[in-house]
Amino acid sequence: MKGIHVTSEIKPLKKVLLHRPGKELLNLTPDTLGELLFDDIPFLKVAQEEHDAFAQVLRDNGVEVVYIEDLLAEVFDNDRSIREKFLRQFIKEGNIHTKAWQDILFNFFNSIENNKELVMKTIEGVNLTEIKERPANSLIDMVDGGNKLVLKPMPNLYFQRDPFASVGDGVTLNRMYSETRNRETIYAEYIFNYHPDFAGYVEKWYDRYDEFHIEGGDVLNLTETTLAIGISQRTEPDAIDLLARKIFNNPKSKIETILAFNIPVSRAFMHLDTVFTQIDTDKFTIHPGILGPLEVFKITKGETADTVNVEKMETCLEDVLAEALGVEHVTLIKCGGEDPIAAEREQWNDGSNTLCIAPGVIVCYERNDVTNALLREYGLTVLTVPSAELSRGRGGPRCMSMPLIRED
């Protein structure tokens, strides 16, 4: 099947997009952790082993796994001119402002003949010591000692949930909160525009060139007609308003309602999917810390194309979700159970960030043993993956994956 089709968080997952972490993690240093949105430096060898185990669990359960680096390489294999266009854009968006350095970096990348190797190198970043060519009369070697990242790495790319979000038969191609991550969306842009499996088949509900920030971890498909979106540290209310107007006025969209969840601004509550995810027809994992202060707003189409109706929901979260799903009631399973210390610890390691691959079948980090045991008590099938190093990036199985096709 070509294109994208995702109308639920729980329907059987058939095709998923991943990125296997690469040498970009080797370009993390203690001094750059904050800028690159990491709290620690993962050990690459083990992180790759853990990621391979994650991908294998998906394959073992009937999911086709595709990698963003492979899809973009296939685009370049089909058309050399698209490769060159990508490189020009990628370098410019990497804050390389002088034409001399833009040309130097273009020549450096363009000399890499293998297209997958090229894609991985763009993700990895470029150190000055790798560049033989120099602008005339350059002082850079003397000033920086020849050791400097000319293009910064993109270590967050193994969290494929954020650069775009699959919604129905289309995507929100996102404008990321941090300049560090916004270049990540270029990869998806070129795949959707030029890859034969996607070009012409994918609607674009939101664009990376739109004004406001939105990230995929805040977007949950509750039903074919209802979206949940987090108002978070990284998704602005204005972005949700703009997306709502676009999606309600596109005749190809089936979305009729958007529920906006105003979650606390916190590193631990980075996106909506770090505080709750749907895991069955009537069950959600949830971090207990959001149950008190959570505000929910119901957004529907306005009387004109430029307006939407916004209504603050006055009922509890369980009732909001039950109404949205059309079920009698929902069960909220707390991360860490009733133990507040376990809840904080396992929330930090993404105990609520589960990937549902079929109703009641979920992929979780094995380290969250308190939450995982509780999920099994509720009758869920919990498939665990190792996570000692992957979890250092502050994202779980849902964060690492972007569903492309789910069954109806």
Image: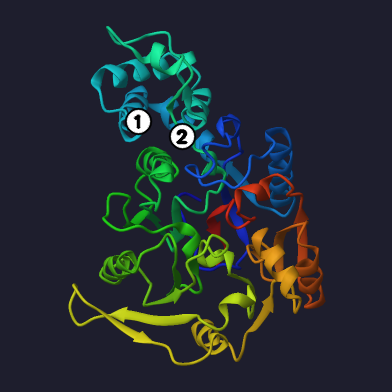
Earlier in the chain: of badge 2 and badge 1, it is: 2
Q: Which residue is mark 2?
A: 72
User: Foreground: 38 or 374?
Assistant: 38
Q: Which residue is mark 1?
A: 86
Query: Dividing the image into 4 quarters, which one contains the C terminus?
Result: bottom right
The numbered mark at residue 313 is: none
Report the mark closest to the observer, 2 or 1. 1
Res. 366 image quadrant: bottom right
> What is the total number of numbered labels drawn onto the structure image?
2
Q: Secondary structure at mark 1?
A: helix
Residue at image coords 53%, 23%? 117
User: Looking at the picture, how far across and down is residue 302, in whole percent?
Assistant: 24, 81
Q: Secondary structure at mark 2?
A: helix
Vertical comparison of 393 with 216: above or below: above
**In the image, is 109 to the left or to the right of 28?**
left
Residue at image coords 40%, 11%? 142
**In the image, is 388 to the left or to the right of 96?**
right
Inspect the image, locate mark 1, and give the three-letter code of the amino acid beneath it: Phe
**In the image, is 294 to the left or to the right of 137?**
right
- Coloured how? rainbow
Res. 348 image quadrant: bottom right
Asked if the residue at tag 1 contacts the one at tag 2, i.e. Cβ–Cβ closer than 8 Å, the answer is yes
Residue at image coords 57%, 44%? 158
Label 2 environment density (alpha carbons within 10 Å; few <14, some 14–19, many ≥20): many
Label 1 environment density (alpha carbons within 10 Å; few <14, some 14–19, many ≥20): some
